[in-house]
Image: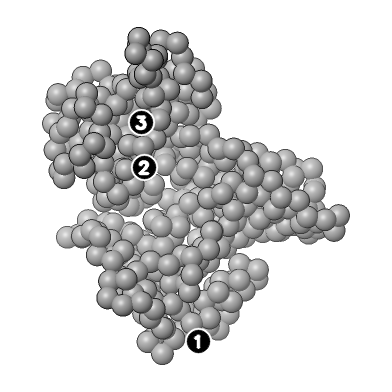
Amino acid sequence: MATPPSAVSQSGQTGPSASAARVALVGVHGFGTHHLRNLERLQAAGVVELVAVADPKPPESGTVPGAAAEFPGLTELLAGTPGLDVIIVATPIQTHAPLGLAALATTADLYLEKPPVASLADFDALCEAARASGRSVQIGFQSLGSHALAAIEELVANGTIGTLEGISATGRWVRDRAYFKRSRWAGKRSIDGVDVVDGVATNPLAHAVATALRIAGARTTADVASVETDLYRANDIESDDTSVVRVHTAAGLPITCALTICASESVEPYVTVQGSAGSAVFHYTENRLVVSTPAGRTEKTYGRDDLTANLIAHRNEGAHLISRITDSGAFMLVLEAIRTAPAPVPIGPQYLRWEGAGDAAHAVVVGIEEALERATREHLTFSELGAPWAVSASRA
């Protein structure tokens, strides 16, 4: 992005221009560090000015611009920082609802990290608050900014891969014991009666689910006919770490998401668009699209729009908002199905192996790669496939 002339100081250094959006960041650790780096880039381009941050744990030295005020919480930040244009919330899942509602009580627009909130009721309340306030809300599904999505829409529309038959999402990641010890809420379904829903489909691989839903045209709650879950855990946690979620859209299209953080090795996740005459595989973390048809195979890497810059362009210029809150309704139906499902079934130790030692050890579900591949190809759950560690479909 070109730096506007007003963003260049007499010393030649770039910085916020007079028209830069005044931004506050709530949560500077975890994924908040990504926002700090991105805001540094946008501030150098004159697009934003990071004026304040909030976190009960002080930021690491040198990570926050010296001119930005630091506060222990959003309440204090709002009391001491008038005139904000955008508030970014990158905090634990169970705090999204109260912090989001507090942000929407101001005149600022809101960028809320994924998942939006931890229940459908909280989602409805947040949507209503956004509607009543007239504020815009961007949800942090960064993959939705990929230009590959428009290319997929075009190839489906022009019949390049034939008639659309289904969509699947495959995620194979590795997460060790330390991952679940990093915070009090990690791997929890709830804390002290407050919903968290930190499962494989709702947090680490939530982008896979959200991207598959977007490609299928399932944005709002009205776009979804049904959601089925088949949830398991290899780790000693409350939430699921190995699961299949199967969605049918209102138009009858199947979307099957087979996900684990208990693979033998991490592989970039991908969404497969299945057609009667070919397929398109979208590696969303890489913005890479592979299209296979009888005519051959093509591969292309696309650009991606930054969601923070997009929210500011929407605020200033009326640009189309890429990941607006109402378009997360379909995803929230998936989260709600997981939240209200029975507790994940433990996978028996005879079907696991552990690699590494101590907190660096990670569980591997034996045969998980084949199970994921079959589940997405055949649109079946682990139970229906008859995986040896799964609950029998007849008993599910």
Q: Residue at x 51, y 55 (%)?
A: 208
Marked residue nearer the N-terminal end (1 or 2):
2
Q: Decide if residue 336 is in sight here.
A: yes
Query: Is residue 259 rendered to the left or right of residue 86?
Result: right
Q: Secondary structure at mark 2?
A: helix
Residue tagged 3 = 40
- On screen, 47 above or below 194? above
| Type of the residue with mark 2 | His
Q: How is the image coloured?
A: one colour
Mark 1 and mark 2: Cα distance apart in space: 40 Å
Q: Mark 1 or 3, which is nearer the eye?
A: 3
* Residue 170 picture quarter: bottom right
| Type of the residue with mark 1 | Pro
The foreground one among 53 and 3 is 3
Q: Mark 1 or 2, which is nearer the eye?
A: 2
Q: Residue at x 41, y 10 (%)?
A: 6
Marked residue nearer the N-terminal end (1 or 3):
3
* Residue 14 picture quarter: top left
Q: Decide if residue 247 is in sight here.
A: no
Residue tagged 2 = 34
Mark 2 and mark 3: Cα distance apart in space: 10 Å
Query: Is residue 271 rendered to the left or right of residue 29?
Result: right
Q: Which label number is shown at residue 388?
A: 1
> What is the crowding at mark 3: few (fewer than 14 residues within 10 Å), some, or many (at least 20)?
some
Q: Residue at x 20, y 39 (%)?
A: 61
For the image, the number of numbered tags is 3
- On screen, 97 above or below 51? below
- On screen, 319 above or below 222? above
| Type of the residue with mark 3 | Glu
Q: Secondary structure at mark 3?
A: helix
Q: Position of residue 165 (x, y in %)?
A: 71, 58
Q: Secondary structure at mark 1?
A: loop
